[in-house]
Each structure stands twice: as C-alpha cells, then as structure tokens.
Amino acid sequence: MSIADHLPSDKKRFKDKFGYDFQKIKSETLSWLKDQELAVFFYFAGMGNIGVGGMAITPANAGFFAMGLSMLQNHTPVNDLTTEFHIGSVIYVASTFRHTHFNGKQVVVHHRSEDLHEIFSYNLYPGPRAKKGLYGALLTKGEKEGWITSHCSTVQVVSPYDNSTTFMHEGASGDGKSGQL
C-alpha cells in the first residue's frame, strides 16, 4: 500500500516507494479502463448512516473480483440509490498493471482529496487489498467526522433455545478474524 496524495499519513508515499509521480500511472489506469468492458457497482461500506458510499469500477473479465468485493461490502442496487447517496470512495481495478508496472506485486494506491477517497487496486484478490482499501477510506472519514472504525469480524450465534449471542473479534491482520466466522 502506498499513498499518492499530500494529506497527512504515516504510510509510505507512492513517489518515495516507486520513484515517480502517481499522476502518470493514474492517467494510464483511467485510459486503460476506458477501453475495457466494465463491471460497475455501488456499495456502502459501514453500517446505518456511519460509513462511506462508493462505486467500484472493474474490468468485466475480473467479474469474480467484483462479485467477491460486492459480497464483502453492502452492495447497493442502482434502483435502491437515493438522492442522499454520496460517492465518497471509488475503487478502480486494473489487475494487469500488477504485471506490467509492479513486477508481479500486489499494489494498492490511495489517492485522497477532501471529498473523494480513490483506491487503485492493482491486484486480483478482493480480500486484503480492496477490503483494506475501504478500511482505509473508513478510517479517513471517521477521523474527519469523529467516529471509530473497528477492524473486526462479527458473528451471531442462536442457541436451540432462541438465545442470541453476538461475538465481535477486533484485531490486526492475521489475528484470526476470518477464522472466527
């Protein structure tokens, strides 16, 4: 992961990591996407009114990525969008750039502005890279608005006696959250 903007961050900047300005590859990415058959969907990352609405733009031939990502987020059908829906994040998927620009490495680049958190996902795996990209968008928005983003998994168990118990496991990557499910 790298950051391609000048907003505050303790993460490594794209230019420092790769030696050139991100605007060059951003332009290449958007031009490449224009020539692709696309799968596009809307999502809301978060719960209730706390979170960030967004749009994912992926090549149609990476439909498994789009489907997996939509299952990880609150996929919002176009017919369910309201005038209050705000696109605060966009995920652009350009999987082939992993090989053409990043020596086979999975790379995610965050480009933030005051109103939009862009996530450029140069990989083929919807889990850690894109999911954590949205976690970054939630952290950024929560910091601005004064709410906390939990990095967790939650499961609810219903006993044969109709008693419900909800478990929330918060922790770092690799801490067993998915295993809980």
Image (cartoon, rainbow, N blue to C red):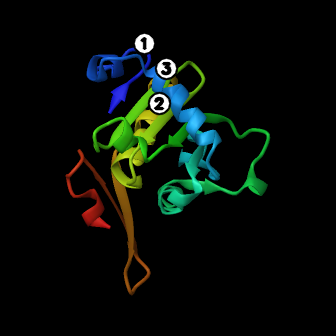
Q: Residue at x 44, y 81 (%)?
A: 162
Query: Mark 1 — residue?
Result: 6
Question: Which residue is farthest left?
Answer: 175
Percent x, y for residue 56? Answer: 58, 46
- Residue 27 figure quarter: top right
Query: Mark 3 — residue?
Result: 23
Q: Residue at x 41, y 41 (%)?
A: 97
Q: Earlier in the sequence, mark 1 or mark 3?
A: 1
Q: Earlier in the sequence, mark 3 or mark 2?
A: 3
Q: Establish if 23 lies above or below 58.
A: above
Spatial CA distance of label 1 from label 3 is 13 Å
Query: Is 38 placed left or right of 102 in the picture?
Result: right
Query: Is 123 placed left or right of 144 in the picture?
Result: left
Q: Is residue 85 visible?
A: yes
Percent x, y for residue 120? Answer: 46, 36
Query: Is 107 placed left or right of 176 in the picture?
Result: right
Judged from the image, the secondary structure of the residue bearing numbered disc 3 is: helix
Judged from the image, the secondary structure of the residue bearing numbered disc 1 is: loop
Q: Is residue 150 visible?
A: no
Q: Establish if 20 lies above or below 120.
A: above
Spatial CA distance of label 2 from label 1 is 19 Å
Nearer to us in this view, 16 or 55: 16
Query: Mark 2 — residue?
Result: 142
Spatial CA distance of label 3 from label 2 is 26 Å
